[in-house]
Image (spheres, grey):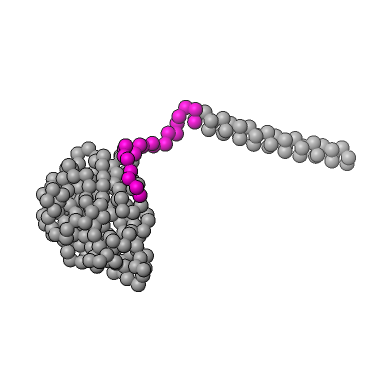
Amino acid sequence: MKKALLLLSFIIAFGLGACNSISQNEITQTTNSSTAGAEKGTVTPEVFTVPEFTPTENKTVTATPTGFWMSMPAFANNEAIPAEYTCQHENQVGISPEIDWGNLPAGTKSLALIADDPDAPLGLFTHWVVYNIPIEVQSLPQSMPVKAHIVGIGTQGVNGFGQNGYGGPCPPFKMNHRYYFRLYALDLPTALEDNLNADSLRKQLDHHVLGQAEWMGTYHQP
């Protein structure tokens, strides 16, 4: 009986030792394999460089992987929009903010901008539509007039207020809303018709967008 118990103990101990040996070998092989892959460069993350740009005070840049970038000096990306660009301005509409951009994708023939609010109570609300922007233009200046044609800049479409130009944020019930400014690099010439709203412009842009840059600001009435 004692011999049988000794034999059984020997078999169990040998089996556990073998399992531990196999597990350790597998771990060692996996580690060595991962290290070898890293040394051979089998996994190389995509790296891109933001084009050279000298920011001014409170100015940052958003850039696409291709380097196409935009910037809005009035407020940082994902931060609050100052009151002068909203319905709290003395004109009760707000002035349009400056927008800068650069490093257009190859083949770009014009640019377009749509600014809208996805948090509006009745659905997406458009605050600004600009298109037929020549590639020689590198920014939209602050305080653009509310009219269809801006000489040397482009065409302003119809916003959600029914006007050709910019209409600032004015969310109801003191709710905090997000406002997206999206800039599109297009392979279209500067020949789109007047009075396009955001929906009709998007239809025109379908299959013609070479690059898109985005900036977002937030606002709630005091």
Measured from the top left, where is residue 3 in percent x and y?
Answer: 87, 37
Q: Could you tell me if residue 25 is visible in this image?
A: yes
Instruction: Identify the image quadrant of the N terminus.
Output: top right
Q: Could you tell me if residue 126 is visible in this image?
A: no
Which of 5/40 is in front? 40
Measured from the top left, where is residue 208 in percent x and y?
Answer: 20, 47
Write the residue at 31% across / 62% down: 83
Which of 46/56 is in front? 56
Taking 128 as reference, is 63 above or below it?
above
Measured from the top left, where is residue 187 in percent x and y?
Answer: 18, 44
Measured from the top left, where is residue 136 in percent x and y?
Answer: 17, 42
Write the residue at 45% across / 29% down: 41
Residue furthest bottom in the image: 173
- Asked if residue 42 lies in the magenta stretch, the reply is yes
Write the residue at 61% across / 35% down: 27
Is 156 on the left or on the right of 6, as rendered?
left
Which of 46/206 is in front? 46
Write the residue at 88% across / 40% down: 2
Figure label count: 0
Per the rendered image, the range of residues in magenta is 38-58
Is 16 on the left or on the right of 151, as rendered?
right
Taking 184 as reference, is 32 above or below it?
above
Which of 159/145 is in front? 145
Is 181 on the left or on the right of 132, as rendered?
right
- Magenta stretch, main secondary structure class: loop
- Asked where in the image residue 89 lies, by quadrant, the reply is bottom left
Instruction: Identify the image quadrant of the C terminus.
Output: bottom left
